[in-house]
Amino acid sequence: MTKLFVRDKSFYIKLVSIGIPLTLQGLISFGVFVSDAVMIGRLGEIELSAVSIANNLGFLLATLAFGVSSGANVMIAQYWGKGDRDSIHMIATLMYRILLAGIALFTVLAIGFPRSVMSIFTSEQLVVETGVRFLRIVGWSYIALGLSTANITMLRAVGDVKVSVVASIFSLVTSVTLNWILIFGNLGAPALGVVGCAIASCSARAVEAAIIIVYMAFYEKRICYRLRMLFMKKLSVVRGYLKTATPVIVVEMVWALGTATMAVIIARIAIEFTAAVTIQSTITQLVTVFSFGVAHASAVIIGNTVGAGEYRKAEEYAKTLMAISFLLGVVTSGILLILRDPVLLIYNVSDLTTEYAYQLITIYVVVTIFASMAQTSLMGVLRGGGDTTFVMILDGVILWTVSIGLGAVAGLYLQLPVWIVYIVMKCDEPIKVFFVMLRFIGKKWIHDITRDNSVPALDK
């Protein structure tokens, strides 16, 4: 029986060296998000809800990019453990081709059909019209958003995480500065409101993407991907990539569509509920960045270990990572309690919205413990171990049957109080943790996907 915490110093060194930069990136990305949310929140509930709803389309694209690149990430991490760079290049080519098609689709939707997109989520005409003005502009940032998400995720697979921090810092500075100038009309600029926020978002994304692309073209020394490789004809890893990546892409898109569907349900219940969820998301994104860092570092560590053929060591690492994620969840819970009241004072919203936000944050104090464990196990350990099909089934089934199905019944059919509806929507997290633990006990989660066969490989 292995110990709960491994005594392998190299494991902790790798966890810290990958996890800390990813945590910093998460904090900086949160800064970009909160600069939008807080400044738009100062304009009022209509603007806050409109931007939040409009951003669902960009969220879907970012999720697609993350899914496509995470599917590649699983294979790249294991091939990196074997030292096979040629296969990594072929995987990256497949990833880029799929991603560019997705970017084109979402850009057309945002720029060409913004009113149709907004009308899916809300029937409030003032919110729709405000969101249309934002979406028509922010849609131009989707090429930068998609490429940045994919490139950062791919570099993460080989432990190259520093450039993402640098790019995120410049993106944050650009976003905050231009938001302050353009939303409120400072330094002699016109007060553009949500349009100014959209321009700031486009500029910040462009800066981030440019830094990462220049780094990959001239300075990156691990993957060494070049533009000409996008047109390579021999792609012997197609079958393996599709088999591994498809479940990842499906689960990310199913999750994104599920999140968007929940946004529809929430918006149909009350506009104050939408604003409250936006406020709650702001504070929870801040305090969960450490879990984010551990989860994504877990995928790299487990993937590299499995690729090197050290399956028993991967099992030991998994136990330690789950224990760490539990402890982080407890810490996060305490931080949420401390920050709850001060954060609510920032927003210029109605008393009802403030009451809803207080209730949602209080509920998430408990949920965050399970969310931390679910994130590390599903996005990190199981995905890094190549168990992508199980993750797809578990995530998809629970999301659509519990969070969405029961949430819709509770909110739209039974018209229960907002806080009860939110509990129903978030009870998926402890359920997922329960089934993940059963999966670990069964010892069927490690698959070496770099081999010709993909049967469970927990035999060494």
Image (cartoon, helix red, strand yellow):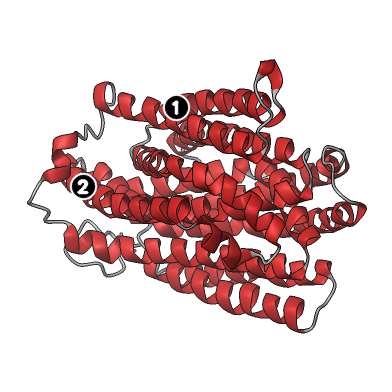
Q: Which residue is mark 2?
A: 93
Count the numbered circles shown: 2
Identify whether 417 is placed above or below 299. Answer: below
Tell me how far mark 1 sits from mark 2, CA to CA: 24 Å
In the rendered image, the residue lying farthest to the top is 187
**Residue 166 as seen in the image, left or right of residue 176:** left
Q: Give coordinates of residue 211: x percent, y percent.
A: 39, 25
Q: Residue at x 26, y 42 (%)?
A: 80
- Looking at the image, is mark 1 or mark 2 earlier in the sequence? 2
Q: Give coordinates of residue 84: x percent, y percent.
A: 18, 43
Q: Few, some or many C-alpha atoms within 10 Å of disc 1 (few <14, some 14-19, many ≥20)?
A: some
Could one spot residue 312 in this view of the protein? Answer: no
SS at badge 2: helix
Identify whether 51 is placed above or below 345. Answer: below
* Front one among 37 and 309: 37
Identify whether 323 is placed above or below 393. Answer: above
Q: Residue at x 19, y 43 (%)?
A: 89
Q: Splitting the image into 4 quarters, where does residue 267 fall?
A: bottom right
Q: Residue at x 64, y 63 (%)?
A: 263
Q: Residue at x 72, y 60 (%)?
A: 367
Q: Few, some or many C-alpha atoms within 10 Å of disc 2 (few <14, some 14-19, many ≥20)?
A: many
Identify whether 249 is placed above or below 417. Answer: above
Could one spot residue 48 in this view of the protein? Answer: yes
Q: Give coordinates of residue 130: x percent, y percent.
A: 65, 50
Which amino acid type is marked by label 2?
Thr
Which quadrant of the figure contains the C terminus?
bottom left
Which amino acid type is marked by label 1?
Val
User: Of the numbered discs in the image, which one, if any, rests on residue 160?
Assistant: none
Q: Which residue is mark 1?
A: 207
SS at badge 1: helix
